[in-house]
Amino acid sequence: MRATHIKHSKGVSMRSRRTKFLLPLAMAGLLGLVVSGLPADAAGQPKAKSEKLRPASSLKLQDEFDHIGAEIHELTTNGRTSYYIDEGKEGDRAVVFIGGASTSVEAFQLTEFARTMREELGLRVISVERNGLGASKVDPTLGYSDYNNEVLAVLDHLGIDRFSILSISGGGAYGAQLAAAVPDRVISLHAAASVSSSLPTRTPPRNCDQTLEQRNAANMRWKRDPMAWWAVPGSPVLAVPGWQATAYLDGVRAFFMGGQLDDATAMSLPGILNCSPGAVVDPSRITAPTYLYWGGKDTSVPVSVMAQWEAALPNVVRATVYPDEGHTVQYRHWDQILADMAGYGDYTVACVRDKTKLVPNKQAADVIASGAALGMCAWAHAS
């Protein structure tokens, strides 16, 4: 927004100039004069004849700031600065949020259309920026264990011992690595359309002979067009006001926030890590109850990848396929993921007679058959 500059006459203070300006307006209001063709109110402001203002005494004005986004914090450990968000209350169940490939911590904002539900369920979300994305300084020598150390340093700094993990799409490799690194600290693991790159059941990675430079050249088309990277044409999440615009902003932060400009290294490093000796974890170490969420029409991370998670992990509690969903299943059914992460895995989120409720899983099929809709009622209203 362009600022408006007022040139002051020599020896005339701003206060005296303001007084000279307001007095005629006040007089006009008192005398009922017409300004610009409209009657003036008591404050000297034009008012349409049909406009009826509510009494000032009846207005309930806010005392606190409204929420406009997650605060991004910094923590420097061993010379490296980590950037993270911490959304929730102390004492709430902590969740480590690991977004999709080439996303920043701001990707969490794409779930906050259900902020009220998250707060009611008592969930506190922590997300730590990955190597080279957003404000994080890129270091090609860092691997999965280094990211684990950054996450754990943040959690320890916040005084958090136990936590759940939520991984989305390309974040799946990092989620599995973290869950295997500290199994005693993980309450539950939730993988939504997540790659299986860190599991022994994975499809062998391709292009392991490519250099970093070759990978960067291939990724440059996405690097230079974050809107193309984040476009989700036809997805039901487009019904959420501001969702697509917020997704584009995450792309801008992830790709350019740290001055990366034409450097696609951060986008290329996950592919190199997939080919590294430490890419595959021992799945027997992932002992936490695991929940899987997939879209039946997902062409980016197809349902066959979910089967690889099921085959690898010893404690898959529930694997859900939503037949008509694509690669944004994690956002469309974020309400269910929230309930599961909060410990309500025995319930299904449904809109019953225009009220969002937790329905016992044993009754869910009958409730849906009787006319209820999956998810919170906002989805039913949007369709």
Image (tube, rainbow, N blue to C red):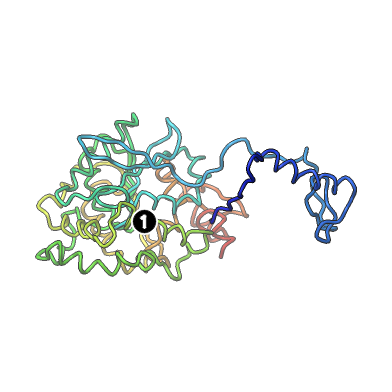
Q: In the image shown, does 361 or 233 lie closer to the viewer?
A: 233
- Residue drawn 40% across and 60% down? 329
Relative placement, left or right, of 135 versus 91 is: left
x, y percent for residue 234: 45, 70
Regarding residue 83, the answer to whether it shows in the image is: yes
Type of amino acid at the residue the image marks with label 1: Tyr
Relative placement, left or right, of 266 versus 8 is: left
Quadrant location of residue 89?
top left
Q: In the image shown, does 161 or 158 lie closer to the viewer?
A: 158
x, y percent for residue 203: 18, 63
- Residue drawn 23% across and 39% down? 80
Where the C terminus falls, by quadrant?
A: bottom right
Q: How many neighbours does mark 1 have within 10 angstroms: few (below 14), some (14-19), or many (20 or more)?
A: many
x, y percent for residue 361: 46, 50
Residue bearing the label numbered 1:
293
Q: Is residue 300 above or below residue 352?
A: below
Regarding residue 362, the answer to whether it shows in the image is: no
Per the image, label 1 sits on a secondary structure element best described as strand
x, y percent for residue 115: 50, 46
Seen from this angle, which residue lies furthest front? Answer: 10
Q: In the image shown, does 343 or 7 lie closer to the viewer?
A: 7
